Amino acid sequence: MCFCGGGAGTRLLSMSHTQAGDGNETSSTDFVESLAQFENHLRHAQGRSAHTVRAYVTDIRKLLCFAEEHGVRNLSDLDTRFLRRWLASKQSGDPARTSLARHVSSLRAFTSWACRAGFVEVDHGGLLRGPAVAHNPPVVLRVDQIETLIETVGQDASNMAMRDEAVIELLYSTGVRVSELCGLDLDCLDFKRNVVKVMGKGAKERFVPCGFPAVRAIERYLRVARGELVRSTSGNAVFLGVRGSRLHPSSVQRLLQKWCARANIPSLTPHDLRHAAATHVLDGGADLRSVQELLGHSSIDSTQIYTHVTAARLRSAFEQAHPRA
């Protein structure tokens, strides 16, 4: 009986193996247990997003299935050489560099955790290095385009439009992630100091300044529209959907698409507003460290991409305006 069933290796079917020939029984119980505990660690201890948890767990499940298929039964046998062998097998289909980089990230996260948890004595994945991934500068809308979007929403007096205006204003004003916005509770809003408290990646809490237009839009939504959306399932969520439950990121995506079409501007994603907020703040003279804090980036490298955006915009303006450009 094996740890995973089928060619894809995506489901757990049993808890043990018997090696034929020498009569010694080896167990894959540690495979099953470690995968479950690793998932719990990612989800609860580190507070990783559902997408990250799913991706990492899928990668490690495939690694463990690959191990069983090649006669490896114990986590301690997953040394650096074997891990590289698995990575090499993933390259046979010429995957994108981003996929290979994620495989390495998954391995490093798993082996580091397994070592700390006592499943193995050596963190073999710590020696792995993923391929360099080129980050293309994001496309950023102009300030006037975003103002057109907000003005278009503001022309509609319906309750849903009030909510949508508050959502868009807050995303652009603070640069928060859409998951952070949807996770806001009423006690996260501090209008005396004009800040919002958000729970970011890795369950890291931070306070983000909020502009006056966004504050006014949120206060108007709370005063007029939210009460019309509240149901027994609403709880303390700030932003509610049509059925009264907490607003979902996919709903934010749809409302942005709707209002962009009405405003006759390029379609936006919630992350595009985050990009725009960061870029426009840098254009206005903010330093990179402040933008890092604003966005909740754990590394300045993640924020560095916006310097390329502002440099490109500066170059474009220079070429258009300078007589000897």
Image: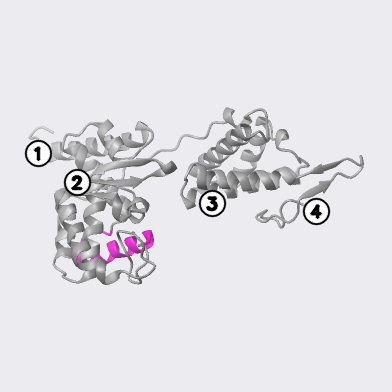
Helix, strand or loop for disc 1: helix
The numbered disc on residue 1 is 4
Secondary element under disc 2, as helix, strand or loop, is: loop
Mark found first going from the N terminus, 4 or 1: 4
Mark 3 / mark 1, whichever is N-terminal: 3
The amino acid type of the residue labelled 1 equals Ala
Identify the residue shown where x is 54% and y is 31%: 129
Choose between 122 and 218: the one closer to the eye.
218
Left or right, 239 with reference to 98: left
Amino acid residing under circle 4? Met
For residue 239, what is the image quadrant?
A: bottom left
Identify the residue shown where x is 19% and y is 46%.
Answer: 194
Between marks 2 and 4 in the image, the one whose residue lies nearer the viewer: 2
- The CA distance from mark 3 to mark 4 is 25 Å
Q: CA distance from mark 2 to mark 3?
A: 36 Å
User: Which label number is shown at residue 194?
Assistant: 2
Residue linked to disc 1? 321
Q: Which residue is mark 3?
A: 54
Q: Nearer the viewer, residue 297 or 218?
A: 218
Q: Which residue is located at x 17 percent, y 34 percent?
A: 285
Q: Position of residue 262 (x, y in %)?
A: 21, 67
The crowding category of the residue bearing disc 4, from other C-alpha atoms within 10 Å (few below 14, some 14 to 19, many at least 20), is: few
